[in-house]
Image (spheres, rainbow, N blue to C red):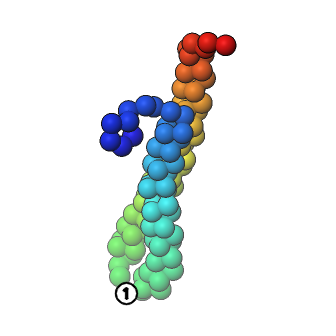
Amino acid sequence: MGGGDRRVTRDLIRNIGGKIEANTRDPLQQALDQVRQSQDVNIANYTAVTPAFAGAYIAGVEFVTQDWDTKIDDASDIKAAMNKLADNWDETEQASTMRSD
């Protein structure tokens, strides 16, 4: 939808869903992978901190990983919903188009 073109099409809607997923899912997955990798390093350092700090760190990492997992799933759900919307849009447009056969 650049310039003067304001026509909504099935492909346009699908592309929006794909962009939402790509711009949220992939970066979140990369961040999540890095958090999980950092856990291995930090477990070795627990002997240098108090048990309360170690427990708080574990709880924080669990919260972040669960939150990001949910957001990753949400991005995929949004894409699927946009694809369904695109199909419905196309069916409606086809049904409401007058034909001169």
Query: Quick check: 38 above or below 83?
Result: below
| Residue in the picture at 50% in, 61% down | 26
Q: Residues within 10 Å of mark 1 (few under 14, many from 20)?
A: few
| Residue in the picture at 60% in, 30% down | 87
Which quarter of the rendered picture does the C terminus lie within?
top right
Residue 68: % across, % down: 46, 56
Q: Which of 13/2 is in front?
A: 2
| Residue in the picture at 54% in, 34% down | 10
| Residue in the picture at 54% in, 26% down | 89
Residue furthest to the left in view is 3
Residue 62: % across, % down: 47, 62
Residue 69: % across, % down: 51, 55
In-image side of 54 versus 32 (left or right): left
The image quarter in which residue 100 lies:
top right
What kind of element bears circle 1?
helix
The residue labelled by disc 1 is 48
The image quarter in which residue 59 lies:
bottom left
Q: Amino acid at mark 1?
A: Ala
Residue furthest to the right in view is 101
In-image side of 40 versus 7 (left or right): right
Q: Which of 19/90 is in front?
A: 90
From where the camera sits, is residue 18 visible? yes
Q: Which of 50/23 is in front?
A: 23
Which quarter of the rendered picture does the N terminus lie within?
top left
From where the camera sits, is residue 68 visible? no
Number of marks present in the image shown: 1
Residue 48: % across, % down: 37, 87
Query: Quick check: 84 above or below 26?
Result: above
